[in-house]
């Protein structure tokens, strides 16, 4: 018993000494506790039960009395804390609004509505000064100034600007202006984080990154800096915020000290499952407003649809949006800029089937249009990137200084290449898509695709690396149908991926539709991006479904006589009859085989298959032959290239479909009659000739038309036509050449034919490819207006 009492006595004495220390000067009443301790020491000598009870009662009474004394102190403590929070918030508001020496104040207009795009904010002079002195820039682009104004005003913001539009400045500039403080940027990719930190360091802005591989020591140092009074920017991956208790507590401290300025969510579309690049970790960012309700959030992205915006607001717990040009006091201020970058000139050029000829063509194009300038060539694979880099260097006798960048290159070497590229010692980077994100070099004058991208989203993003300084730049896709098959083997197990690839092929094959319209249509269907978002600052679609043609892409400036649209219904019927015969004979043909077969070449033979033990179909090694006369009433008389063009066209329309057969080492792509094939194959040749079939048209390059040089290009620029893309389905039902969104040009076909046409022409490489560029005669607006 004595022991127990002593134990209690020790604990209480310890607690007592803590209280006494903390209240020594403030609460004289508590000093009487020393008397109690004396009493308690006397309690140890009392042995009777009654005495013990009496001592306990006295102690309880004393505890109660102390609690009564403490209660008002705790109340005082709470009210002091609340008062402190209010002062903190007033201070933070003051530091935002008083950053200009000007005595003007932003009163949100008479009716509480403010136009953030205006340059008459209280801080505008300061902002302009910092833009020039710190960032070395003279003017703002797109909606940059509005976003910066809203950020300085402490607003929650959603900002949609195109790739390369200059989103970074909208949070970097407010980070270094006005009161000291911390801007926390949350990015999904290491490459983006690396590049941001590098760029900030170059600008002399203090920054640090917290990523998975940041060592414990570095983390500790960064946390200390955040806790301290440092300002600047921190780059984080989203999971870090949600998972790290230490980080949360450090940010809470920074916030309590009034130093947490804003959170920036880069690539904010990743928050929404409805978007195209959902990242589950981004959903955890809902903690930001819960933990830091007063800290503004700035969400930036290049692609945000009307469908994903509400989801984004919900996840980030942001209030409903208001327009940046007429903002109320409480909403999330919304800004968007036209998604089409008018300095980017898109074109698709045919690519020779022969690898060496392809290199010559690409090399000649570079030397003609951008000798010695910076560019990127995107390649299908690591091996292709290596080969293209080596071949181009060799072909140009070292004049085109190439470098290689892909996942197989060691990190240190990547860094070296990057530095050389930035310094201009390498002009042309041959890369896989591993190169791009976070690569911010302003003067990239061309982005060439040696092979198709896997999707139009990818293509838009990759080409967005060109012309980030706003100067005219070229985006050239060298395309041939065989590349599409090659790419299909990469995505064949993914239905969604195959669908996206088909859209990319349609874009590449299209000789008519303005490339801007093609992007607008695609993103409108795939991401619900308003058509108007390509022309106006109207991602949400209030401006309706029209979009103007760009007036500068290959299809806009094409000479109408350089292409020819033909009725190919009978040729299509013949191809499908042959394909039907091959399939019914257990045969297996690739697209290239089929081209040969329908043209009556290759002895009319095709490989067949047999049923394996487990029902699998295996190549039998035997050949079957085909009597073209009886199966299809004779051969197709189009050129090899035109047949390939036609078959790819039929494939995009669903008359021909692909299937994939894998071996242990590779996946091969074969063709078979598609779901629509029966529309033609059920008819006889006579029926087709009598016009009973739905007409199929296909557009080919008209090789007889002489090439017109690109001098007419500038004359065509600026001439625009409005196209309504909202109701295209019905309109195009009876427009066969438009059904697939584009026709005809099959690179390899055309290439081979051009090879023939320009064989003797020294200048053929350059001149020949100008078919798609020169075009004095201009577009064919009527046709275009009908395109999907
Ligand atoms: N007002 C401006 N004037 C001139 N150049 C600018 C301006 N604003 C930004 N830039 C430059 O534009 C380039 C692209 O900017 P930034 O990296 O911020 O683009 P982004 O919108 O973040 O693109 P992405 O979506 O591809 O990351 C940079 O080189 C930047 O220096």
Image (tube, grey):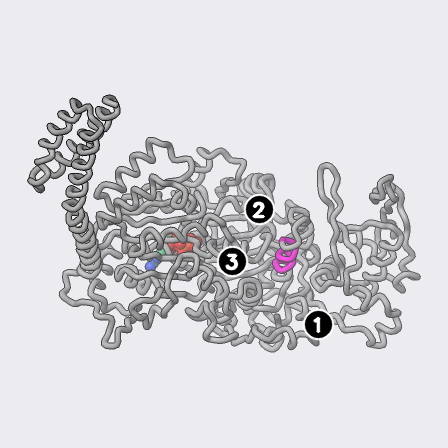
Q: Residue 499 lies in magenta, yes or no?
A: yes
**Residue under label 1:** 736
Which of labels 2 and 3 is toward the front? Answer: 3
Residue 95 position within the rendered picture, expressed as x and y whole percent measured from the top left: 19, 56
User: Quick one: label 2, few (<14), some, or many (20+) residues within 10 Å?
Assistant: many
- Can residue 202 be seen in the rendering of this structure? no
Q: Quadrant of the C terminus?
A: bottom right
Ligand 1, seen in the image, is in the quarter at bottom left
Q: CA distance from mark 2 to mark 3?
A: 27 Å
User: Quick one: label 1, few (<14), some, or many (20+) residues within 10 Å?
Assistant: some
Residues tagged 1 and 2 counted as in contact (Cβ below 8 A): no
Please tell me whether residue 204 is drawn above or below residue 85 in the rendered image: above
Q: Residue placed at 59% from the left, 68% from the top?
A: 513
83 vs 158, left or right, is left
**Residue under label 2:** 379
In the structure shown, which secondary structural element does the residue marked by tag 2 occupy? loop
* Main secondary structure along the magenta-highlighted residues: helix
**Residue under label 3:** 275
Residues tagged 3 and 1 counted as in contact (Cβ below 8 A): no
Which of labels 3 and 1 is toward the front? Answer: 3
């Amino acid at each position: 018993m004595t022991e127990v009492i002593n134990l209690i006595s020790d604990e209480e004495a310890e607690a007592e000494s803590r209280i006494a220390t903390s209240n020594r000067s403030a609460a004289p009443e508590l000093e009487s506790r020393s008397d109690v301790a004396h009493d308690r020491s006397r309690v140890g000598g009392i042995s009777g039960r009654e005495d013990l009870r009496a001592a306990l009662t006295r102690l309880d009474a004393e505890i109660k009395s102390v609690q009564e004394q403490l209660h008002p102190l705790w109340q005082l403590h709470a009210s002091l804390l609340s008062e402190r929070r209010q002062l903190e918030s007033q201070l933070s508001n003051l530091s935002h609004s008083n950053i200009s020496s000007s005595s003007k104040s932003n009163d949100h207009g008479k009716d509480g509505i403010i136009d953030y795009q205006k340059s008459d904010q209280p801080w505008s002079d300061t902002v302009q000064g910092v833009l020039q002195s710190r960032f070395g820039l003279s003017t703002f682009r797109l909606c940059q100034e509005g976003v910066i104004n809203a950020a300085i005003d402490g607003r929650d913001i959603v900002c949609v600007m195109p790739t390369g539009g200059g989103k970074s400045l909208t949070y970097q500039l407010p980070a270094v202006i006005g009161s000291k403080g911390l801007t926390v940027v949350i990015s999904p990719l290491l490459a983006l984080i690396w590049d941001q930190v590098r760029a900030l360091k170059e600008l002399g802005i203090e920054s640090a990154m917290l990523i998975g591989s940041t060592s414990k020591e570095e983390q500790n140092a960064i946390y200390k800096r955040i806790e301290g009074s440092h300002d600047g920017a921190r780059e984080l991956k989203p999971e870090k915020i949600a998972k790290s208790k230490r980080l949360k507590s450090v940010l809470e401290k920074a916030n309590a000290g009034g130093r947490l300025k804003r959170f920036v969510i880069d690539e904010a579309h990743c928050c929404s499952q409805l978007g195209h690049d959902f990242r589950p970790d981004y959903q955890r960012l809902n903690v930001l407003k819960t933990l830091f309700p007063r800290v503004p959030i700035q969400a930036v992205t290049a692609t945000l649809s009307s469908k994903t915006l509400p989801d984004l607001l919900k996840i980030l717990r942001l209030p409903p949006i208001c327009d940046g040009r007429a903002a109320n006091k409480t909403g999330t201020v919304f800004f968007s800029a036209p998604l089409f970058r008018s300095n980017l000139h898109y074109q698709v050029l045919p690519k020779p089937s022969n690898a060496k000829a392809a290199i010559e063509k690409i090399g000649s194009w570079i030397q003609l249009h951008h000798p010695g300038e910076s560019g990127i060539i995107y390649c299908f694979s690591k091996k292709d990137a290596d080969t293209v880099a080596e071949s181009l260097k060799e072909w140009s006798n070292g004049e085109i200084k190439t470098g290689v960048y892909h996942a197989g290159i060691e990190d240190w070497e990547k860094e070296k290449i990057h530095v050389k590229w930035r310094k201009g010692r390498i002009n042309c980077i041959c890369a896989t898509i591993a190169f791009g994100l976070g690569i911010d070099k302003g003067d990239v004058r061309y982005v060439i695709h040696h092979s198709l991208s896997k999707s139009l989203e990818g293509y838009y993003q990759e080409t967005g690396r060109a012309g980030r300084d706003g100067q005219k730049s070229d985006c050239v896709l060298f395309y041939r149908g065989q590349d599409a098959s090659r790419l299909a083997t990469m995505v064949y197990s993914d239905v969604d991926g195959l669908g996206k690839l088909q859209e990319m092929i349609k874009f590449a094959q299209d000789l008519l539709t303005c490339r801007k319209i093609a992007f607008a249509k695609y993103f409108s269907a795939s991401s619900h991006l308003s058509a108007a978002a390509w022309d106006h600052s109207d991602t949400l679609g209030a401006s309706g479904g029209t979009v103007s043609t760009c007036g500068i892409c290959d299809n806009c400036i094409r000479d109408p006589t350089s292409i020819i649209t033909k009725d190919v219904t009978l040729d299509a019927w013949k191809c499908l009859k042959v394909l039907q015969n091959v399939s019914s004979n257990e045969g297996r043909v690739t697209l290239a085989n089929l081209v040969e077969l329908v043209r009556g070449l290759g002895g009319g033979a095709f490989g067949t298959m047999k049923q394996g033990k487990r029902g699998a179909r295996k190549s039998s090694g035997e050949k079957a032959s085909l009597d073209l006369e009886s199966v299809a009433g004779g051969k197709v008389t189009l050129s090899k290239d035109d047949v390939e063009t036609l078959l790819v066209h039929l494939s995009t329309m669903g008359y021909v479909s692909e299937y994939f057969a894998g071996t242990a080492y590779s996946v091969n792509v074969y063709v078979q009659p598609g779901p629509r094939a029966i529309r033609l194959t059920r008819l006889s040749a006579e029926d087709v000739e009598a016009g009973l079939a739905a007409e199929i048209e296909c557009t080919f390059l008209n090789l007889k038309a002489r090439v017109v040089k690109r001098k007419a290009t500038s004359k065509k620029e600026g001439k625009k036509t409005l196209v309504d893309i909202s109701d295209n389905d019905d309109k195009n039902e009876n427009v066969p050449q438009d059904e697939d969104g584009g026709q005809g040009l099959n690179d390899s076909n055309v290439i081979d034919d051009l090879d023939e046409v320009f064989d003797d022409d020294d200048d053929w490489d350059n001149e020949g490819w100008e078919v798609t560029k020169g075009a004095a005669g201009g577009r064919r607006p009527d046709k275009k207006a009908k395109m999907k």
